[in-house]
Image (spheres, helix red, strand yellow):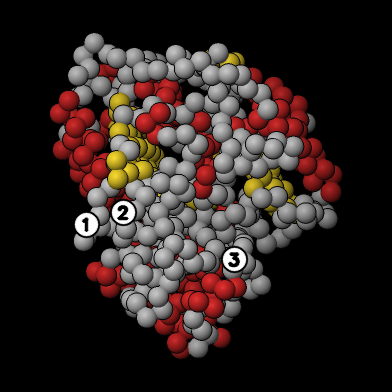
Amino acid sequence: MIVAVLAVAATFAWQAAAWAAPSSERPNMLIILADDLGFSDLACYGSSIATPNLDALAAGGLRFTQCYNTARCWPTRGALMTGYYAQQIRRDALPGVATAGGKGTRPVWAPLVSTLLGAEGYRCYHSGKWHIDGEPLKNGFDHSFDTGAPGQSNFFRAAGNTDDGQPSPQTNDYYVTNVMTDHAVRCLKEHAEKYADRPFFHYLCYTAPHFPLHALPEDIARYRDKFRDGWNEEARRRHARLTERGIVHHSLPEMEREVGPPYDFPDAIKQLGPNEVNRPIPWSELSEAQRDFQSVKMAIHAAMIDRMDQNIGRVIAQLRAMNALDNTLILFLSDNGASAEMMVRGAGHDPAAPPGSATTFLSLGPGWSSVANTPLRRHKTWVHEGGINTPLIVHWPRGLKARGELRHNPAHVIDLVPTVLEVAGMKAPAEFAGAKVPVPPGRSLVPAFAKDGTVEHEYLWWLHEGNRALRVGDWKIVALKNQPWELYNLAVDRGESHNLASQYPDRVRELEAVWTRQADQARQLAQSDKPANPAVGKKKKPASAN
C-alpha cells in the first residue's frame, strides 16, 4: 500500500506557485543556517542558553519539532540549496556512483536556488560557510563572504576567509561570527540604498557552534558556572522543558555509554590532556578536575550560540531599519545535529592557553553532544534522530497566518527550495542548461503557514557513510553501517529506545523496499548529465537596476 501511494504522489512533488506578486512586492528571503547546533540548543527549544532574538522569531512565527537534515554539513547544504537529496546531485556518497561525495559536482540540471532567483530579479547575498561545489559568485550571488572550504578552523583568524574573492583583513578583534554578520548587514544596507525596488535572497551561514570551541571571553564568563551539575542533569532539565512546552512527548533515552566520537583520533585525545573524556560516562564518575574541564567546554559552546543570537539580532535590526522585516521570510535551521567528533586541527592545541581562545582546539564531545541533541539519540553523522533532527524557525509577519504555533509534521531541508520558489511566485524550471529537470522530492512548507496548517511527505530517506534510514508516517527504519534494520514508532518513541523490528518483520521488509527503490532512483539521477549551456540561467538585468 505504501508503494502504491508513493507512485501516485510523485507526480505532484512540486506544486506551482499559487500567486505571483509584482517585483516590488515580492517577499525577501533570509535563510540562517547554524553549524552543528543540536535539537535543544536554543532557549525556545528547551535550553538554558540565552537566545532572545531567535526566541522572538519563534514567538512571532512557527517552530517545527521534526525538521530533518542529512546528518552532515556538505550534503545538507547541497540539498538545502537545490531541493534534491544530496545523493541525487552527487553531493554525498552512493554505492555505484564513483564521482559522488564531499567533492562531487552537481549535475547541470541542479542549479542552486540563488541562480533561479537571480534570473528573476532577486539580488542574492551569501555570508559565511559555503561547502557546496562551485563558487558563490558563480552561482547567482552578487556578494559573498566565504569562510573557505570546508569552513572555519579558527574563529579568531581571517586566514582563508574572502570577501567577494579578496582576502578578509585580519584585525585584533577578529571573531568570525561578528565579521560575517558585518558583511550581511553591509549587504542589506547597500540593498536598501541601491536596490530597494528589488527583493533579496540572503544565505547567512554561521560556523557556530561547530568545533573548535572558540568564544569571546565576556561571553564565556556568563556561562562559566552554569553547567557544573553536568550533562546528565542538564539533559534532564532540557527534557522537562521540552515536555512541558509540548515539543516532545516521549521519555528521555539513556546516554549510550559506549558510543563515542564517530572517528577515532587517539593522539588528539592524548594531546587534549587527562581531563578530556571521549565517552558520555556518568558525571558522578568523573574526577573534580574532569568535571571542571568539561563544564568549561559546555560554557564555550553556549557562548558561541549566545554570540550567534546576538548577531542575528543585528541582522533583524537592520531589516527593521530598512522597513523590510514584515515582508521577509526568515528560515532558521541547522545543518545537522550536535557533534560528538573530537580532533585537533589547524595550528593545534595549547593546553596552557585559556579554554576557548585562539590557540586552543577543543570539541564538544559525546557527553555534551548528547545534551545538545536532547532528547534524541546519537549525534552528527548518524541517521538516528539526534543526527538528523534539529530546529526550524519560520518568521514572516506578512505571510504567516499562525503565530507562536508548533508544527509537528516532518519537514526536511529538501523542502526549502520549493517553499522559497512558491513564496517568490515562481515555478520550478522544466529545463535548465539544456537538460530536463527531474521532479524534486521536496514539498513546499507554505501550507503549514496557515492556522493549524500542515504538510505531508510520502516518505523521507537518508544515507550517510553507510548509515541509512527511511521514515513513512510515524514508522522509521534505521540501520548503522553493515548492521540490520531497526524499527521505531516515532509517534511514541522519538528517542528510538524500543526496537520493534522483530515484532513487525513484514513492515521492515516493506519499508526496506521503499528505501532501496529510492536509492536506485538516486543512483540513476546522479548518473544523468549533459554538457552545460553557459548562456542558460544568467541573471536578467532589470530596467531599474544600477
288, above or below 519, in the image: below
**Residue on which disc 3 sits:** 261
Q: Secondary structure at mark 3?
A: loop
Q: Secondary structure at mark 1?
A: loop
Q: Amino acid at mark 3?
A: Pro
* Residue 109 visible in image: yes
Q: Earlier in the sequence, mark 3 or mark 2?
A: 2
Q: Earlier in the sequence, mark 1 or mark 2?
A: 2
Rendered location of residue 75, percent (x, y): 55, 42
467, above or below 140, in the image: below
Q: Quick check: 244 left or right of 175?
A: right
Q: CA distance from mark 1 to mark 2?
A: 8 Å
**In percent of the image, x 32 and y 19: which residue is there?**
121
Which label number is shown at residue 171?
Answer: 1
Rendered location of residue 143, percent (x, y): 30, 33
Which image quarter is the C terminus in?
top left
Which label number is shown at residue 158?
Answer: 2
Q: Amino acid at mark 1?
A: Thr
Q: Closer to the observer: label 3 or label 2?
A: 2
Q: CA distance from mark 1 to mark 3?
A: 34 Å
Tell whether label 2 touches label 1 (CB within 8 Å): yes
Q: Earlier in the sequence, mark 1 or mark 3?
A: 1
Q: Amino acid at mark 2?
A: Ala
**Residue at the bottom extreme of this rendering:** 288
Q: Quick check: 355 left or right of 250?
A: left
Q: Closer to the observer: label 1 or label 3?
A: 1
